Image (spheres, rainbow, N blue to C red):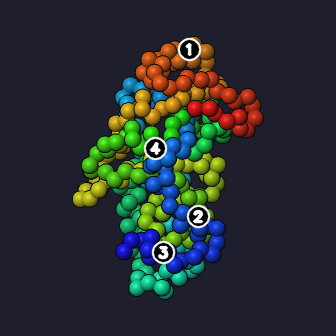
Amino acid sequence: MSIDDLILPLKPKTWEEADQLEPTELLYRTTPVKVCHYMSCERFVQLLRSQRLVFTPQTQQDKDPADGGWPNANHEEATGLNKEYYEKFPMVRNFAMLAKESEIDRRLTYLHCWFEGAYESKTMWSEFAGDGTGVLLCATTSELVQALSPFSADYRFAIDQVKYVDEDVPLLEFVGGLAGRRKFPKFEHESEIRLMATRLPPVDLASLPTILKAPIRLQDCIRAVFLGPAMYKPRREVLKKWIRRVLPKANVLDSNFTGSFYSEGLNF
């Protein structure tokens, strides 16, 4: 019996529960959903040279140190769909164990974060691409997954959307991996699609690498590169030539950003 068979009789009572029940990982693996990734010019040059994506530990997400943790609401008595689940099925709730497993998973998991959509954001240019001096990479989820395969046998690879859940909203405890994709609602503007690489046991936690470099066939997944609106002209021209040589199938374009919070949609 699969988890789908178990949860089928459970009917969500709130939109937060319905959102958490929605299966999305298979969608992002198989469907060309448009995603973008903002980065500094220096990191982009390193990426072109190495042909490796740099995954960083989930425990080092400085802007949201609680990234991947359970909300406070889950530390209380089960309510809503969680309560119904434990009442309907012969499952003993042991949240202390869930919390401990989640914390270990955070230490074992490395992230590379993308932004769902096909438009530019002033906030994202500012926060992640050197105040507009960097680049914006455009790809699709299915092509990203294919370009990263085969991945190391020591890691479990996943791609899925982040759930933006506040402390007073419980996560569904019977949906695997949900806590690992949770962030605070103040980051909701990022619409994050998360590449995750989790080290498989057995493993010595003290010996985990500080970063994970995953080989990727960039020419098979990068559809377009937008050069930042504040990138100065000499660098812009040199970078255009280099990108066209290393990524011959990718469109190399100037930013559409003109001062409004969002530009018009990106065509790639």
Q: Which of 60 and 140 is in front in this view?
A: 140
Residue shown at the point (51%, 71%) measured from the top left: 172
Q: How far apart are marks 2 and 4 (CA)?
A: 22 Å
Label 1 near label 3: C-beta < 8 Å?
A: no
Image side of residue 100 versus residue 136, left or right: left
Alpha-carbon span between mark 1 and mark 2: 44 Å
Instruction: Find the distance from the CA under tag 3 to the CA under tag 1.
Output: 55 Å
Q: What element carries label 4?
A: helix
Nearest to N terminus: mark 2 or mark 3 = 3
Q: Position of residue 55 (x, y in %)?
A: 41, 43
Label drawn at residue 72: none
Q: How crowded is mark 2: few (under 14 residues within 10 Å), some or many (20 or more)?
A: few
* Nearer to me, 73 or 29: 29
Q: Residue extending furthest right?
A: 260
Residue assigned mark 4: 142
Query: Type of residue at label 3?
Result: Ile
Residue 7 tag number: 3
Question: How packed is label 1: few (under 14 Cα within 10 Å), some, or many (20 or more)?
Answer: few
Please report the residue visible at 61 percent of the width from the left and 18 percent of the height from the top. 232
Kindly identify the residue that appears in the image at 50 percent across and 15 percent down: 241
Query: In the figure, is residue 225 to the left or right of 200?
Result: right
Picture quarter containing residue 34? Answer: top right
Q: Which of marks 4 and 3 is nearer the N terminus?
A: 3
At label 4, which amino acid type do we have?
A: Ser
* Disc 2 versus disc 4: nearer the observer: 4
Q: Could one spot residue 56 in this view of the protein?
A: yes
Residue position marked by numbered label 2 in the rendering? 19
Looking at the rendered image, the disc whose residue lies closer to the viewer, 1 or 2, is 2
Q: Which residue is drawn at 52% across and 53% down?
A: 161
